[in-house]
Image (cartoon, helix red, strand yellow):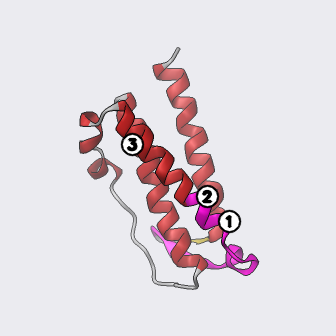
Amino acid sequence: WTLKEVVGHIADGERVMTYRLLRFARGDQTPLSGFDQELFMPPFGNWTTAQLAEDYRAVRQSTITLLRGLPEEAWSRKGSANNASITARALAYGIAGHEIHHMGVIRNRYLS
């Protein structure tokens, strides 16, 4: 992947995980399928750095707003995504961990 694709992947991955988190936190237990991250890639190579930065910030702010508004009981609610049971709390940690992982990839592969 290019650097732009990695940044776009972080944002799209967060979108998918946040959608799952919202559904489960609200008590929706409809099983959700996985997604093909390669299908999400094509547009990012054509985006400007400014577009990627704006998208990344908007997604992150939306996630923060959602998480701040969750009542305590929502954090332990579970759902099924990609054939695995997971809580809203675990998805929130997964969002953070996904970003940390890919920021490490960016530092090691693209900025060093």
Q: Position of residue 16 (x, y in %)?
A: 44, 61
Residue 74 highlighted magenta (yes or no): yes
Tell me, for residue 8, which label it has, or none.
3
Q: Amino acid at mark 1?
A: Arg
What residue span does the magenta drawing correspond to?
A: 63-82
- Vertical comparison of 47 with 90: above or below: above
Left/right placement of residue 30 relative to residue 97 reads: left
Q: Amino acid at mark 2?
A: Ile
**C-alpha separation, residue under disc 3 versus residue under disc 1:** 24 Å
Residue at x 37%, y 31% (from the top left corner): 49
Q: Amino acid at mark 3?
A: Gly
Residue at x 41%, y 46% (from the top left corner): 55
- Quarter of the image where one finds residue 52: top left
Q: Position of residue 91 (x, y in %)?
A: 60, 62
Q: Secondary structure at mark 1?
A: helix
Residue topped by disc 1: 68
In contact (CB < 8 Å): disc 2 and disc 1: yes
**C-alpha separation, residue under disc 2 versus residue under disc 1:** 6 Å
Q: Secondary structure at mark 3?
A: helix
Q: Earlier in the sequence, mark 3 or mark 1?
A: 3
Residue at x 58%, y 82% (from the top left corner): 26
How packed mark 1 is, by other alpha carbons closer than 10 Å (few <14, some 14-19, many 20 or more), is few
Residue at far top of view: 112
- Vertical comparison of 11 with 64: above or below: above
